[in-house]
Amino acid sequence: AEDGYDLWLRYRPLPPAQMKLYGGRASQLVLAADTPTQRATRDELQRGLSGLLGRDIPLTQTVLHDGAIVVGTAASSPLIARLHWDTRNLGSEGYLIRSAVIDGHAATAIVGNSDIGALYGAFRFLRLLQTGQHIDRLDLHDAPHLTLRVLDHWDYLNGQVERGYAGASIWDWWKLPDWRDPRYTDYARANASIGINGSVLNDVAGGATILTPTYLQKVAALADVFRPYGIRVYLSIRFSAPIEIGGLKTADPLDPQVRAWWRAKADEIYRLIPDFGGFLVKANSEGQPGPADYGRTHADGANVLADALAPHGGVVMWRAFVYSQANPEDRAKQAYDAFKPLDGQFRANVLVQVKNGPIDFQPREPFHPLFGAMPKTPLMMEFEITKEYLGFATHLVYLGPVYEEVLSSDTMTHGKGSTVAKVIDGSLEGHRLTGMAGDANIGTDRDWCGSDFNQANWYVFGRLAWNPSQSSRTIAEEWVRMTFSNDDAFVKPVVDMMMGSREAAVDYMTPLGLVHLMGPGHHYGPAPWDASEAEADWRPVYYHRADKQGIGFDRTRSGSDAAAQYAPPVAAQFSDIQQTPERFLLYFHHVPWDYRMRSGQTLWYELVAHYAQGVEDVKRMRETWRGLHGYVDEQRYQQTASFLAIQEKEAQWWRDACIAYFQSISGQPLPPGYAPPE
Ligand code: GCW
């Protein structure tokens, strides 16, 4: 059945013409299989090539005839050693793939400086076949631009996944460490295929249990499964663990006993998991314990952990997502206010992990003002892959454009071209420790992600973590070819549909710079009217500030002045209503309903038009999909069709609820020709 389990690693037989094209180029595999990673590479190539080409490719020791694929490192393969290729620019994880003559025969060499580099090269080679590329004159090389390419799982030990819409946690803690579900290997394969090299196994708001000896054994078992695929495990830790499982009276980071406890804990972990990655921490945010409980700073907190991990080569990923009632004036300002003054105070093995925007993974928000503002500290990006604010499992929203928009934003901190991507990849400020994290959308559903199209969001995250300057359209196209079909009549409309899907969601949910109109708590569906007192700074009315005169959050000097957190040219742009891009208008300004937009329409008319457009766009997505019935197997066709129907219904719900509510505040008539809902 086409249940999506294979993700983009669908090695189904290629069309005959393509098979013929590749056949002569893949007649034997020459590689060593002495290490676990080499064996994983061999298995993947055999599985992939036999699936795609419909016949088994023999393993040989030497090149016997044309069409050999020679894989490995100079150390693992005498054939590769004899090529004397310069591989210095590949680093430890890069690869090159080249057509060459080896022992008198036409061959393809896939070469890394490490087994992992060769494995990444093998996946790339398979992708060439899967996406219908020529493979007869290859000269490719690639290496990751970021050091840490990590999935953050918000999985609790009881199997629940916070903001998870694809079933339960795939980690079966009850049966670990003895039962190693084969699914763990498939998880590792999928990640390795896109270059992800780290996995934080547990939720940032979980308890301390994961650090007990019993659970560390289970963690070690997962680390064993992932290791051949180049994936290290990391753990989210609870800052008060020294009290909860250590029997101490305090978790004060400057207390010598606390420091000793963390050192001993790190030593214990590394005895079990020699390549353990490190800790992820959510501290003093949304009720989590942290250094502020003892009057200490985030740097004090991060550094005690960093000191414990440093002797073993581990890192701390300390989150900047800190929300408390402490800054009720404007939640958007909190992270910057708390972290900017600490720049330069973190140990060398600490990264501060910053969400893409200052609010919380909205359909659209401006880039986070911390990017570029802490030059002495490696900042890693945190994107959300799970669609917490974007329609959960069913809405088709390709997140590539969300990520790309932020990565290509110009912080202007070192003049023009100081993009967020360059902050993240370390090139702007000279950092070697770099990273990107994605909050995973993975669960026990057969298709892993709750829908076929959600798999694209895992895929594009990994590809951008490898190289944050890539185009999300190119990545979408790759994914479509691998996941569905190479037929251009299918690929083009589906890629267009994916690329437009994000703007559609922005339009039917939160156009023109609005944010957080979702129902509080669950975050599914519209609730712009919600004004309850509890957690007031999470409430829609707090964000849109609609009143009789207008709508929007004034973040200029006359308001919260959050715009001033950006570098001066950006701050000036966002503070000036004329210069603010309309897509961020209501994020930075409180704007009169009759304000003239660039189109010449009033703000009110244009707001209504955006909501209507969002619904129209989803209608068009449905039509596109209907036209592609013949290209997809029935199971995947039908599910996508049904989900798009849900999306259309809910886009209408969003449109009607928001327009009706905002109209009740604005008192403005509906635009002429606008058909109110039946
Ligand atoms: O987006 C919000 C989510 C919480 C999440 C929190 C965070 C893990 O609603 O569920 O908790 O952010 O990122 O810490």
Image (spheres, helix red, strand yellow):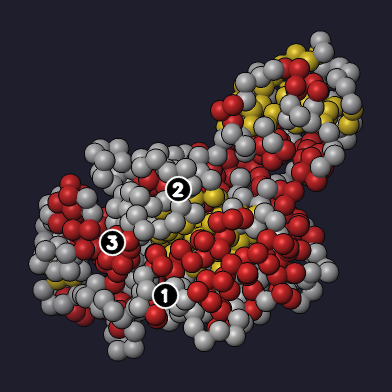
Q: Earlier in the sequence, mark 1 or mark 2?
A: 1
* Residue indicated by mark 3: 341
Q: Nearer the viewer, mark 1 or mark 2?
A: 1
Identify residue type, mark 1: Pro
Q: Determine the CA span between mark 3 and mark 1.
A: 16 Å
Q: Earlier in the sequence, mark 3 or mark 1?
A: 1
Give residue 610's position: percent from left, percent from top: 29, 60
Give residue 83's position: percent from left, percent from top: 72, 17
Q: Nearer the viewer, residue 305 or 586?
A: 305
Instruction: Determine which quarter of the picture holds residue 678.
Output: bottom left
- In the rendered structure, the answer to whether residue 448 lies left or right of residue 250 reads right
Residue 180, above or below 460: below
Residue 91, above or below 198: above
* Residue indicated by mark 2: 499
* Residue indicated by mark 1: 291
Instruction: Identify the secondary structure beneath mark 3.
Output: helix
Seen as rendered, the residue at the extreme bottom is 533
Q: Nearer the viewer, residue 570 or 530?
A: 570
Q: Determine the CA span between mark 1 and mark 2.
A: 42 Å
Say which residue appears at 69% left-offset and 17% top-offset: 84
Say which residue appears at 20% left-offset and 59% top-offset: 563
Instruction: Identify the secondary structure beneath mark 2.
Output: helix
Within 10 Å of disc 3 (Cα), the crowding (few <14, some 14-19, many 20+) is few
